[in-house]
Image (spheres, helix red, strand yellow):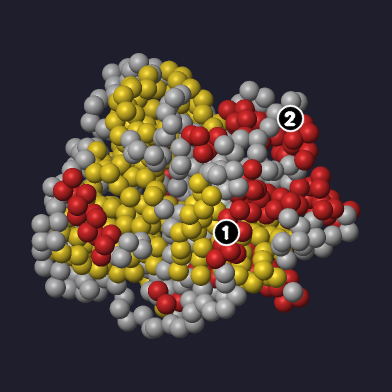
């Protein structure tokens, strides 16, 4: 164990984890290697007796047996740490509360964006020099809550970083070049009135993202040009990515970026070159046969190191086969039970920091020396959540009734014996996916002694175009059939108490929970639908009203759900609110008051329909919340209410 890094004095805890423990903020907030690989920085936050203390620990990677140099940061909620160069650290710090104790923020795209006080500290290796970036702008320091967004660390510069702030003097987003030694900031560029942000290359903005609700207009400006040109408008999906145009790297070729997406004929998502000068998508840079690409890993020089994809767990295809062999060895060390993500690389790629996480492992950081083939633990993110307290996960492969191959994940409580109650938990999206990982909601259910089943039904992401498009206009039938078929396959394996099965989901998962209770009303003892659609015709009308009939979002949802004109009967039949009288199980509905992705009106419609049908239903509308995820306290409430609702129904079984 690296001395001083891991908090080895944490007391051992036994028994099932509490909800508070499962959603607790991590102790280790980040770790980073210096470019030369000789120094390691770890940022921690400890709370003892109600007192918060954040600090840095600085290590010599060649002498990890020596105590670290501690740098006290104080009463901060710390974010991440990175290296501006070999002698200067950048630490993101924030305060979440206003003077009144309320969390400030604003709403956009149906999400709550906290207006926390964000700052970046530039710190010397001995900790004696601490400079706040934007320190020369007294009005900005006094009036601007968010001065913490670094767009480009400009590794080839060594003295400056490029930062984005909302400049109150001009009433829009702006880019500033900031000196990391003095904190002084100089205006580089003003955005348009609707600008969200920029993509830069070597300190120069070449793409600009302008928003209109959940639609994003991509503007382009090649190196040497002075005017911005409109490229295309995209939908922003629920993963906060641009649908079909996710910039995953800036590359080394001037005016060319790396973009993840599916071309018009690509069966799987790949990484392609996008030329800002010609506004054309170019050659495929990287692909993974039979898998959708998730992202890519680049070094400080913007060289492509690896392409990431999900094969149940996180995996990489490396440009250097030798590095791939080392990565395979790391996975073996973690018994192939964790997602091993590379978080930081030295310039020579000899040393790296990896984070391991999995169903029974919320997270831990490690330092790996490729030459010495040595792995040193930095420490766990959640010391109290030990392996024996958490549910294990099995990967279940099955065939749907029409022969389609499906993957599901079954979480089993520790020391599980005999028939157990089971929770079916469809994911959101629907073009998202579940995988082999740690999920606080799943673990909270398993802590009750319940099995939890997650299904990647058709329409899910990660399995290629055909699989994703297989769910289009099949919300009410084929996608639901897949969930039912996965449940049947797990029941056939044994160990399930068939008299106590419930279904719970968020967003699309909330819709699937309601529709499951319609299609198989005698199967479920309880239903929890959080921020779910209930009336597809009304949901489409909401999107059309707020985003326009020809917006990318409306056209997407019309293709996925159905066309209100051509597919009216299909949409009516697939709307749980129109079939409320068929539901038998008690229903809990929860929704954020200000949800702009799935309007809270959807839960109100469902509540009214169930009431009119004289069904058992509760509705919780959460003030000042948008589309989940919600703020910490409301997230705890959401989990506890869900568990209590299901438990009450099970107790009556």
**Tag 1: Cα neighbours inside 10 Å, few (<14), some, or many (≥20)?**
some
**What residue is rendered at 66% in x and 26% in y?**
548
Q: Residue 222 appears at what percent x and percent y?
A: 32, 20
At label 2, counting other C-alpha atoms closer than 10 Å, the crowd grade (few under 14, some 14-19, many 20 or more) is some
Give left or right: position of 522 versus 244: right
Q: Earlier in the sequence, mark 1 or mark 2?
A: 1
Is 410 left, or right, of 640 in this rendering?
Answer: left
The residue singled out by tag 2 in the image is 567
Name which residue lies at 73% across and 55% down. Answer: 520
Dot 1: element: helix
Where 532 falls versus 201 (above or below)? below
The residues bearing labels 1 and 2 have C-alpha atoms spaced at a distance of 32 Å
Does 152 appear above or below 19? above
Whole-percent x, y for residue 475 in the image: 66, 42
- Circle 1 residue: 489
Q: Check the picture and name the quadrant holding the N terminus.
A: bottom left
Q: Nearer the viewer, mark 1 or mark 2?
A: 1
In the picture, measured across the screen, residue 47 lies left or right of residue 583, that is: left
Out of 340 and 265, give the one closest to the viewer. Answer: 265
Which of the 4 quarters of the picture holds residue 557? top right
Q: Position of residue 257 (x, y in %)?
A: 32, 29
8, 573: nearer the viewer = 573
Q: Position of residue 111 (x, y in %)?
A: 58, 46
Q: Height in image: 560 above or below 49?
A: above
- Which residue is located at x 74 percent, y 74 percent? 653
**Residue 141 seen:** yes
| Number of marks | 2
Q: Is residue 119 visible?
A: no
**CB contact under 8 Å: marks 1 and 2:** no
Secondary structure of residue under mark 2: loop
Q: Is residue 575 above or below residue 521?
A: above
Residue at 59% from the left image edge and 39% from the top image edge: 471
């Amino acid at each position: 164990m690296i001395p001083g890094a891991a908090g080895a004095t944490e007391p051992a805890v036994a028994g099932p984890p509490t909800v508070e423990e499962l959603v607790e903020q991590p102790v280790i907030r980040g770790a980073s290697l210096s470019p030369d690989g000789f120094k390691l920085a770890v940022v921690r936050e400890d709370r003892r007796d109600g007192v918060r203390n954040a600090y840095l620990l600085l290590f010599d990677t060649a002498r990890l047996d020596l105590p670290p140099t501690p740098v006290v940061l104080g009463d901060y909620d710390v974010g991440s740490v990175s290296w501006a160069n070999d002698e200067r650290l950048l630490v993101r710090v924030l305060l979440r509360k206003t003077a009144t104790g309320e969390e400030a923020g604003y709403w956009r795209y149906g999400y709550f964006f906290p207006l926390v006080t964000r700052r970046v500290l530039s710190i010397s290796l001995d900790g004696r020099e601490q400079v706040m970036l934007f320190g020369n702008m007294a009005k900005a320091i006094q009036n601007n809550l968010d001065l913490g967004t670094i767009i480009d660390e400009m590794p080839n510069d060594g003295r400056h970083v490029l930062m984005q702030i909302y400049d109150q003097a001009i009433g829009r987003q702006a880019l500033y070049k900031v000196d990391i030694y003095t904190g002084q900031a100089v205006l580089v560029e003003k955005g348009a009135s609707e600008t969200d942000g920029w993509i830069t290359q070597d300190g120069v903005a070449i793409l600009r993202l302008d928003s209109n609700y959940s639609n994003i207009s991509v503007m382009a400006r090649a190196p040497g040009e002075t005017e911005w040109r409109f490229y295309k408008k995209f939908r922003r999906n629920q993963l906060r990515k641009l649908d079909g145009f996710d910039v995953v790297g800036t590359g080394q070729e001037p005016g060319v970026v790396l973009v993840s997406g599916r071309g018009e004929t690509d069966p799987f998502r790949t990484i392609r070159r996008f030329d800002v000068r010609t506004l054309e998508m170019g050659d495929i840079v990287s692909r993974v046969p039979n898998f959708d690409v998730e992202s890519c890993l680049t070094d400080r020089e913007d060289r492509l190191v690896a392409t990431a994809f999900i094969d149940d767990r996180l995996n990489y295809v490396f440009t250097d086969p030798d590095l791939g062999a080392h990565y395979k060895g790391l996975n073996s060390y973690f018994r192939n039970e964790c997602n091993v993500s590379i978080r930081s690389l030295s310039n020579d790629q000899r040393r790296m920091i990896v984070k391991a996480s999995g169903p029974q492992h919320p997270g831990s950081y490690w330092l790996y020396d490729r030459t010495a083939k040595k792995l040193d633990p930095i420490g766990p993110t959640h010391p109290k959540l030990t392996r024996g307290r958490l549910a294990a996960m099995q990967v279940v492969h099955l065939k749907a009734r029409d022969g389609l191959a499906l993957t599901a994940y079954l979480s089993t409580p520790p020391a599980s014996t005999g028939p157990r109650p089971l929770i079916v938990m469809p994911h959101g999206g629907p073009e998202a996916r579940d995988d082999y990982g740690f999920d606080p909601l799943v673990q909270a259910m398993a802590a009750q002694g319940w099995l939890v089943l997650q299904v990647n039904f058709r329409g899910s992401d990660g399995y290629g175009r055909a699989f994703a498009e297989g769910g289009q206009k099949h919300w009410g039938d084929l996608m639901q059939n897949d969930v039912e078929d996965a449940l049947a396959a797990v029941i056939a394996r044994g160990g399930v108490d068939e008299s106590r099965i419930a279904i719970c989901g968020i967003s699309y998962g909330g819709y699937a929970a309601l529709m499951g209770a319609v299609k198989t009303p005698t199967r479920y003892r309880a239903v929890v639908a959080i921020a779910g659609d209930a009336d597809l015709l009304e949901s489409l009308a909401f999107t059309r009203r707020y985003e326009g009939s020809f917006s990318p979002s409306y056209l997407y949802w019309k293709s996925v759900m159905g066309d209100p004109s051509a597919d009216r009967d299909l949409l009516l039949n697939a709307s749980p609110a129109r079939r409320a009288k068929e539901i038998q199980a008690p229903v809990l509905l929860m929704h954020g008051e200000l949800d702009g992705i799935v309007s809270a009106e959807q839960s109100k419609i469902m509540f009214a329909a169930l009431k009119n049908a004289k069904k058992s239903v509760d509705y919780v509308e959460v003030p000042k919340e948008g589309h989940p995820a919600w703020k910490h306290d409301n997230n705890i409430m959401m989990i506890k209410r869900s568990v209590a609702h299901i438990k009450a129904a099970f107790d009556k079984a």
